[in-house]
Amino acid sequence: MKKVHIITFGCQMNEADSELISESFRGRGFEVTADLKDADAVVVNTCTVRQRAEDKAISQIGRLRKWKLERPERRVFIVGCAAEKLGSKKIKGQFPFVDEVVGAKSINSVDAAVERKYPVSGNRYPVTTNSLPVTGYRSPVTAFVTAMRGCSLKCSYCIVPSVRGPARYLPPEEILAEAAAKAAAGAREIILLGQTVNAYAYKTPEAALSFADLLKKTAAVPGVSRVRFMSPHPLYFDDGFFRAFREEPKIARYVHLPVQSGSDRILKAMRRGYTRAQYLEIVKKIRAAAPDAAVSTDFIVGYPGETEADFKESLSLVGESGVSFAYCFKYSQRTDDKGLAPELGEPEMEERLERLLAEVKKNSNDILNKRIGRIEEVLLETGEHGRTSANFVVRLERNTGLAAGSLIRAEITGTRKNTLRGKLIP
Ligand code: SAH
Ligand code: SF4
Ligand code: F3S
């Protein structure tokens, strides 16, 4: 049997795409291997959200030169966001051993590219969705389901809309069929994906479906015990969402809500479309709908023009919003726009990043400690650990002997690093 190895960089949307790509291979009788050495074909699914992500993809491609030379009949496929940005000519120019380049906007053409290299004679092999994981799936009971592709917002710093194209919402039948197939194959937690996933809306002449409707319908799929979503944008929450969030316990009590900056001046320059106060108002509404909900966020430090005073507004937002966690990034210029050139030097960027990370950590510890003594529902990912609805990892004091996917109740007895400790309640 031929084997394909898939290397995925970037966000969950890329991971979901890698899974789709694996189906093209599996339909041609390939098996997915975790070992590059064993593989006949390799796919590098690239990211370019920051320069470093692009550099990582490029050096990964470079490292494949030797692998290809060892057996020239091997095939190299470069796909995804950096492939879209750089283009086939540039990639093949620099790496002549690359066989196929397919950019993120043309995800549907990956199958044709695979076909060019490995034509199917006769029927395709049946593809089952349960031969996962393909990429860095965080658990055997978690499945990603893409609800929308692309993004139609225009955040000044962001390359995603240009490499993924405008927002397109997938038909609800497709989304729900995928969720059902994955639940049937053992997934208990579905994560709906999209760059502004809560903007989801689907209209046909007969019916209209909102994001809240989609969440409820996904929660109702047999076998599904939890629904998560990534990433919502503060602009798109409506009353319907908060109602669904309050009323449907299967919607996870967790919202990852990127803020980017705590300063109104910087938020405006970034064209985020909300103010600090409006962001905090949404966090408040989330907690009003579900008091035990956790909110996490993303920050960018060192955006052009960010003063020490602006940065302090990001620092203070950590405590004020009570986020349980934050991914913090140094600003990376993604356009040729001179106005968007970084103004801070690397040491200053690094210094701000360190200060922000320290603040986030302090706050996270406080929030974790507040969970001690509570009884939490935990979705087991192994016999020994699982996650709460608010997305905290719980390590159990002893192996429960229960299967992954079981929902248990645990008393939280302590914390360790950034996880909770818990005791099974029989
Ligand atoms: N659609 C999501 C974010 C997708 S990109 C949203 O709008 O919330 C993921 C994260 O990468 C962003 O939240 C941002 O914090 C970071 N990011 C995006 N572009 C960046 C850049 N040019 N420099 C540094 N960080 C960036
Ligand atoms: Fe980028 Fe997110 Fe802004 Fe879209 S909403 S442009 S993906 S940061
Ligand atoms: Fe990267 Fe593309 Fe995701 S640029 S963050 S892989 S949408």
Image (spheres, rainbow, N blue to C red):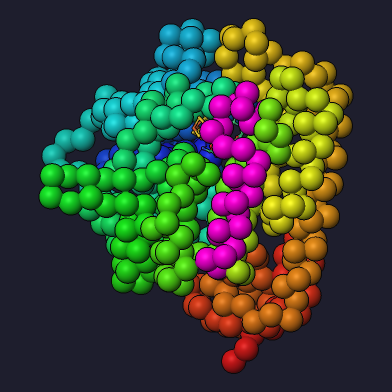
Task: Give the extent of the magenta segment.
Answer: 266-290
Q: How many marks?
A: 0
In this rendering, does residue 31 appear at all?
no
259 or 81: nearer the viewer = 259
The N terminus sits in image quarter: top left
Side of 65 where 167 appears, left or right:
left
Residue drawn at x 41%, y 64% is: 244
Residue 278 visible in the displayed image? yes
Residue 167 location (% of width, % of height): 37, 33
Residue at left offset 29%, top offset 27%: 109
Q: Quadrant of residue 342?
A: top right
Q: Quadrant of the C terminus?
A: bottom right
In the rendered image, residue 197, in percent from the top left (x then y), is placed at 43, 45
Tell me the quarter of the picture where residue 401 sits: bottom right
Of residue 87 and residue 285, the one placed in the foreground of this image is: 285
The chief SS type of the magenta part is helix
**Residue 323, horizontal then vertical, whole percent:** 69, 54
**Residue visible at 38% across and 58% down in the picture:** 240
- Give the answer, above or below, for where 388 lies relative to 399: above
Judged left or right of residue 120, residue 54 is right
Instruction: Looking at this view, name the residue that lies furthest to the bottom.
Output: 426
Quadrant hosting residue 343: top right
- Is residue 81 located in the magenta-colored stretch of the structure? no
Q: Residue at x 27, y 52 (%)?
A: 209
Instruction: Locate residue 120, reporting x and y percent.
Output: 21, 35
- Please state which of residues 189 and 342 is positioned toward the viewer in this rendering: 342
